[in-house]
Structures are given as C-alpha cells and as structure tokens.
Amino acid sequence: MRALTVEVQSSAGRILCCSIFRPGGRKLLGKGHLLSDDDVRMLKVEGMNDVWVTELEEGEIGEDEAVLAVASAMCCGSVEIRMAAGGRANLVATEDCCALVDDELLKQINCTSGVVIATVQNFRYILTGERLATIKSAPFAVSRTQLDAIISMLNERGPILQARPIRDPQVSVLYTDPVQGERARNLFESSIRARLDGLKARLSYSIAVAEEEEAVVRALQHLSRTNPTAILVASTTTPAGPEDVVGRALSRVGATLERFLAPVDPGTLTLLGYKGDTPILSAPCCFRSVKPNILDLLLPPMLAKYRVSGWEVACLGHGGLLS
C-alpha cells in the first residue's frame, strides 16, 4: 500500500489516507473513507484542491474485501454479515441462538497477519440482533497471500463460529428429595422458571418424587416419552458419584453417562448423561440459585440441540470460576 496526493477532481473511488477536518475542527471525512462523487463536490465547495489517498499495490486486496471474505468463510447458521467503516465486518444473530466457537482455530487465525477476529464466548446465549463477532483488517489493505492462507485454513478446518438457532425449546424437570419430592419442587421451581424464562424456554412437564431408585427410574421414563429438548434433575442431595441414585437410574433407563464432575464453580458435582439425543443434567444446589453457575454455561447449547461432550465440559475450567 502506498500513499499519494491527487487532485480532488480525480479522487472519486479512492480511499482517504487520513481524516479531513474543517479549519474550525469539525470532521468532514474519516480516514479509510471511500470517496464518492458527492464527496468530491463537497470537498471542492470546501475549497480543497488536493487530498492524500492510498493506492493498492500488486499482491494486495482492500480492507473491506478482505474482511468480507473472512466473515463469509468463518461463520454459519443464523447469522448475517454487516459491514462497518474502517475495514470491519460484524456478525449479527438473525434469531435467538447459541454461539459455538472453535477456540483453537480462532487462535490460529489470530496468529496470522492482516486480519483479527473477536467473538463472544463459546456456548453464549445470543438474542436476535446481538453481535456474535467482529472481523478487523490492518488499515487499508491485506496481503493477498496472507488472506489466501486464512481462507484456505477456514475451508479446510470449517467455520470458527456457528450461530446454532434455539427454536421453541421445551424442558422437563424431575424434582427429587430423600423424603418428599414436593419439597424439592418448592425449593427450586421459582428459580428454574426464572432461568428458563431468561432463555425463552418453556417448562413443559415436571414430576416430583422421593429420591429412590425405582421412583426416579419411572419418572425419567415418563419424562423421556414427552420428547423434551432437555431433562433437568433438580435434587436436594449432593451425589458422591454416578453410582448414587440418579446415576444408577440413568443407567437403568438406557442413558449413557457423558461426564461427572465439571471444572466450574458453582457446579462442580454436575452429572451429564444422554438418553438418545436428549440430555439429562443433574447439577446439585445450582437449581436453587439464579446467580451464575454451570446451568448458564450448559443450557444454551442443550436448548440449541447441540450435543455437549465430556471433553467440552472439561474445557470449561478456563473461566469456570463464576463466583
């Protein structure tokens, strides 16, 4: 990229190398602005004869074209690209969704030159119209070689960001207590409803039972037949491990254990299993509180019908200290 001075008369279609101000200090046009015919007329009225502009050299591509190419290759799902001034593209959600971010690929792209990407956190719940990411280029131009390397990496590895839509999520809840299930319902229902309301999810079915293996098995079987997006097990007890009542009940209904223990506080004693494609989540003590805990990290991807793996739960440790 090189800078040169040209006559205002012939400057249409060129990019300003620096901002232009009136003598009083009011800004007329900003650095990086693409001059139009209207701009040329305005500058002539202001009495300007020459402007300082940039010119692409061989092997370079303009900043707007570069960030648009990266934005188009790095995302998928319920998202649209909105260009902004100064070599920037923003990715905005077109419907309520969960952001899924390939953190390792993001780091690799950001280690290259010419373009950088900032995203929201992985598993973040995003409302329609919220920004998911921004892509910014070096001023004015990017080396075509660098851009080709980034696009090649994205084409080979897949998108960095997926905006996975959350559509009409329905949650079933099993309340359990060693003495009386209704005690658990009384303790947890209001906070569970508040959390689900914040995610625009509907509590479709709930059952309260004593925390006995046979009763929990029957309840899980019944809730599974309702085809919920997710099943939450809200228990007043703290399990020692998957060999306790809830874990044994999961095994008996044909669910597979994905993970016990999460590097998140509050939420370390989380138990996650799947019956078919339906996640079953037990997070002792977390259901009673509306303060940030592991439910806020795992519910968005579950409601987006994304299968969270045990490895992904293990990766929550960085930033997992929530309070």
Image (cartoon, rainbow, N blue to C red):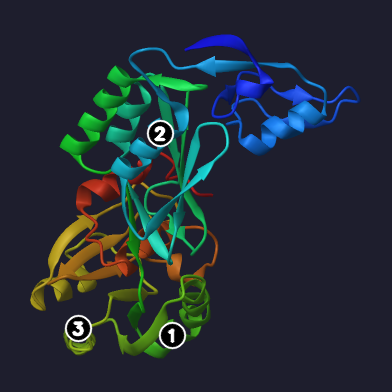
**Marks 1 and 3 close (CB-CB < 8 Å):** no
14 versus 264 height, above or below:
above
- Image-quadrant location for residue 6: top right
**Residue that numbered label 2 is attached to:** 65
Which residue reaches farthest right? 24
Say what secondary structure mark 2 lies in.
Answer: helix
Q: Mark 1 to mark 3: distance in Å?
A: 19 Å
Say what secondary structure mark 1 lies in.
Answer: helix
Question: For the point 66% across and 23% down, which residue is it?
Answer: 9
Question: For the point 26% across and 32% down, which residue is it?
Answer: 151
Left of 147 or right of it: where is 307?
Answer: left
**Residue that numbered label 3 is attached to:** 224
**Mark 3 Cα shell of 10 Å, populated few (<14), some (14-19), many (≥20):** some
**Residue that numbered label 1 is attached to:** 185
Please, what is the three-letter code of the amino acid marked with disc 2?
A: Glu
Badge 2 or badge 1: first in the primary sequence: 2
Please, what is the three-letter code of the amino acid marked with disc 3?
A: Ser
259 versus 246 height, above or below:
above
Say what secondary structure mark 3 lies in.
Answer: helix
**Mark 1 Cα shell of 10 Å, populated few (<14), some (14-19), many (≥20):** many
130 versus 20 height, above or below:
below
Q: Nearer the viewer, residue 86 or 150?
A: 86
Measured from the top left, where is residue 266 in percent x and y? 45, 55
**Mark 2 Cα shell of 10 Å, populated few (<14), some (14-19), many (≥20):** some
